[in-house]
Image (cartoon, rainbow, N blue to C red):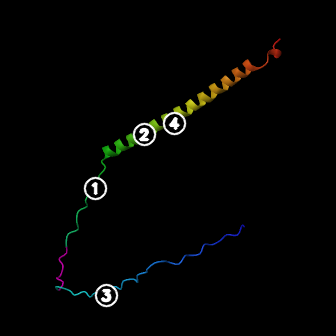
Amino acid sequence: MFQPKVPTMPQPTGLITPPAVIQPTTVTPSAPALPTVPTVAPQPARPVVQITPGGALALVGAGTAVVLVLGAVLVSLLLAVAITGASVAVCAVVLRSLLAPGTKRR
């Protein structure tokens, strides 16, 4: 029952066509090759970006701004989670004191 059964490959049915035979072709040169003239290397398709000192300063400033904004967002999310956890804990303590039996009071 637990032994695997390997399926057998079924035999093909119907007509089977033999593979086509491909005949090799010969290549005949049409004209003799002329000596090539050295060509100038092509220019790059897109221009090269050169960073000036002002541009580098702008990039550093933009990177710093992005890091500060992301840090502020993450810190605010962490504070929101902490405040939510503290408020849930206070609610739990209040509910526990309200639901506790009044026998402990004197």
Q: Which residue is mark 2?
A: 66
Asked which secondary structure carries label 4, the reply is helix
In the rendered structure, the answer to whether residue 67 lies left or right of residue 39 reads right
Foreground disc of the pair 4, 1: 4
Task: Please name the amino acid that badge 1 sits on.
Answer: Val
**Which residues are the magenta region?**
32-38
Q: Is residue 44 above or below residue 15?
A: above
Q: Which residue is mark 1?
A: 48
Task: For marks 4 and 2, give the CA distance.
Answer: 12 Å
In the rendered structure, the answer to whether residue 53 lies left or right of residue 8 reads left
Task: Please name the amino acid that badge 3 sits on.
Answer: Pro
Tell me where residue 21 appears, x and y as whole percent.
35, 86
> Which callout, 4 or 2, points at the residue further toward the start of the chain?
2
Task: For marks 1 and 3, give the CA distance.
Answer: 49 Å
Tell me where residue 68 appears, x and y as whole percent.
45, 37
Q: Is residue 56 above or below residue 99?
A: below
> Please, what is the dominant secondary structure of the magenta stretch?
loop
Foreground disc of the pair 2, 3: 3
Q: Residues within 10 Å of mark 3 (few under 14, many from 20)?
A: few
